Image (cartoon, rainbow, N blue to C red):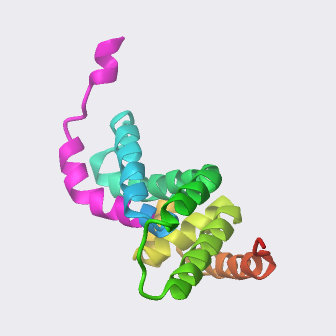
Amino acid sequence: MRAAQDHVRDDLEQVFRADYPRVVGVAARVLGSRDGAEDVAQEVFLAFNRTTVPAAEAFRWMSVAAAHTALNHLRSGRRRSAREEAATDGDRCVPDAADDVVDRDEHRRVRAALGRLPRTQAVALVLRHSGLSYAEVAAALDLSPGSVGTTIRRAESALRKELSTDVLPN
């Protein structure tokens, strides 16, 4: 049983070299953190190694897996992230602390709101804003190309609604 777990796909290095930047980019858009995105990429490539997805379809599979995995991290890591951020706040020297606080708070609010969207909408929005074309988003999510624009518009509307109802803690 151990040998099956240690198996490495013959095409893993090729897929890794081709898709790593995209996987990290998608995850970073969701998480707002390069370190967190690299952790997500590691999980995605480990999961890909266990699949039978052909290398030719890896780009699509990896983009969706990166978005899903990052959203899962976002949803499960909110409290941990807030504690880590609070712990490092005192250690940083920022020229304009007010701008930094506002920026971090706004990014946190957007990431939290994104985590509350329906999964397909959130993934479509992340993939599109990660640089994928409508056709690539459609292929990645098994949507008709004509429905991608509608899905993204609904996602943007839902995100705006989430942000407008998001109450900041005192």
Q: Is residue 17 magenta?
A: yes
Quadrant of image for the N terminus: top left
Q: Is residue 117 in view from this perspective?
A: yes
Q: From the viewer's perspective, is 133 left or right of 83?
A: left
In this rendering, would 123 be left or right of 113?
A: left
Q: Which quadrant is the C terminus positioned in?
A: bottom right
76 or 27, which lies in front?
76
- Does residue 62 belong to the magenta stretch? no
Determine if residue 142 is in view: no
Q: Which residue does the image show at 28% across and 48% down from the upper left?
A: 55
Residue 13 lies left or right of residue 112; in this view the side is: left
Identify the residue at image location x=18%, y=49%.
14
Residue 109, image x, y percentages: 65, 73
Query: In the shown orientation, is residue 20 left or right of residue 129?
Result: left
17 up-or-down from 45: above or below: below
- Which residues are the magenta region? 1-26
| Relative vertical location of residue 106 with respect to residue 140 in this rendering, above or below | below
Q: Name the residue furthest top.
A: 1
Residue name at image x 39 percent, y 54 percent: 62
Q: Position of residue 110 (x, y in %)?
A: 62, 74
Q: Position of residue 70 (x, y in %)?
A: 51, 56
Q: Residue at x 42, y 86 (%)?
A: 95
Nearest the viewer among 22 and 61 is 22
Which percent across, then down, holds residue 111?
A: 60, 68
Magenta: predominant secondary structure element? helix
Residue 3, above or below 54: above
